[in-house]
Amino acid sequence: MSVSVTTMYRLLRSVLVLAASAAALRLPSHAQTRHNPNTCELLNTNMPGRVIFPTDPAYSAAQSSYYAGQARNMHPGCIFMPRNTEDVSQFIKTVRVRTGWDAKFAVRGGGHTLWRGAANIDDGITVDMRLINGTTLNADKSIASLGAGGRFGAVYHALKPHNLTVLGGRVPSIGVGGFLTSGGMTFLSRKEGFACDHVISYEIVLASGDVVNVTKTSHPDLWLALKGGIGNYGIVTRFDVATHPDPGMWYDLVQYNHTDAVLEAQARAFSSFMTPGNNFDPDAMMGIFYDYAGGQFFVRDALWHTGAVANPPVYNNFTSIPNMGSNGQVLPVADVVDQFGANIPPSTPRAFQLDWSFINPPAEIYMEIFQLFKNGVPALADVPGFFVEFLTQPQSVIQPGTESLFGLENNRTDYAMMLMTAAYANPADDQRVRDGITEIVRSMRGLLRRNRYLIDFVYANYADQTQGVYQSWGADNRAKLQAASIKYDPDRIFQTRASGGLKVF
């Protein structure tokens, strides 16, 4: 079949028009080859050596170092590891003007918080603070400056040659930053209150990228808000904390057979220990560990006394209960933490925990609570790898004149706290374990509430994200936390961009 010249001309013209139109729609040649870097790549260009990408061997090492599987199983687009405060400032200045998934971030210190997203993130950037970890003393050794990425095991050992200590975590792997911005229960809690009450100043990078030194006089509202405000106001890079003498601490871990008689004796001993006027000893801190694993129950008492007293009589009601023996001794705080920490697994596949506080009740109430645990936990026994630790301990005694947003009365010695932590093997059991533990705790809290012993306060360091921590501190205190957030982070960077921590809004 033949085609006329006119027809061929029309076809050729159509092709040329289409080609010209396509060329007009295409970007210039230099734009076709230019790559628009994401935030991770931009950080790597501006601060080389600070960014770890998923293809780097260090990425897997960093991810595997989290305590709980919920955090280990997240996948940030990159990990940013600042070496100093200026690096953190440059990070904030970079991400605050970016938008999209790649400008979201989480801040990681010790990486010990259990719930997903507390200190890690999917797709965004995890700011791993662990290289900012120094411990230094001022001239008269009254103040220790702690890098926010440090861990308390290292802090205690740095202070040990000076016969000094600070109020910190009771396990070596507990991170400085998360612990001190969440409150902090310590060996000295009955004598000195919460660890955050002994922070003299904070070095913090605000949402603007500005570096500010926060003290009670320079920024009183922010200083108060940081005593429990976690990551709502910026990234703290240094804590200046008061030091305390370390004459040695009595530490004993006493083990008992699991019987109703032992539980009843523990209930009587703890209720008496917590009763105001019963020879209160501010150096005495302890905890009853009622655990379940492998189909069996275990009962242990951890006894700490910061007065360097061997076999302190304040614990006689506990040590006189028939037991399986102990090996108490007076040691420096650093060595006590090492020994006690050896009883804590370095990591867990999955975990879930809840805490609650209350006014010390009679022994009968404690025994009812122990029975609720004993009767409720076996329903989860067939969950692979299932283990539960149920801890009963005194609450911190906030010292007279101390400013706090926790909603607790100062100088009360009869506040107690319970914590239930479940560990297990598989993500498939997340909801079942959460529901089972929540139901047991609900029954315990209900018992305390009906008898008017339960209080609202939820301790942030141990809390799950569902527990309404800031609501539990009272409306007025929450309003102060929110006002500080509006003032120091008006663009809500740490409310909307930072995934981790508990939010004041």
Image: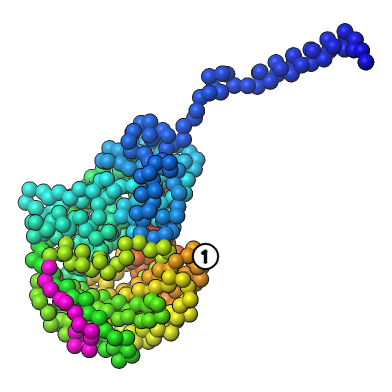
Q: Is residue 215 left or right of residue 126?
A: left
Residue at x-position 44% and y-position 46%: 76
Residue assigned mark 1: 428
Q: Position of residue 169 (x, y in %)?
A: 24, 62
Quadrant for the N terminus, please: top right
* Magenta highlight on residue 328: yes
Q: Residue furthest right?
A: 1
**Residue 29 placement, left or right of 253:** right
Q: Is residue 67 above or below residue 450?
A: above
**How far across and how far down the image is residue 270, in percent?**
25, 83
Magenta run includes residue 347: no
- Residue type highlighted by circle 1: Ala
* Magenta region, main secondary structure: loop
Judge left or right: residue 385 versus residue 177: right
Q: Which residues are magenta?
A: 317-331
Q: Secondary structure at mark 1?
A: helix
Whole-percent x, y for residue 164 in the image: 11, 59
Classify 87 as above or below 272: above
From the viewer's perspective, tell me whether residue 37 is left or right of residue 452: right
Seen at 45% across and 55% down, the residue is 73
User: Would you identify the image quadrant in which residue 366 lies?
Assistant: bottom left
Q: Quadrant of residue 290?
A: bottom left
> Could you say which quadrant of the image residue 48 lies in?
top left
Q: Is residue 59 visible?
A: yes
The residue at the far top in this view is 5
Return the residue nearer the eye: 91 or 449: 91
The residue at the point 35 percent across, 54 percent down is 65
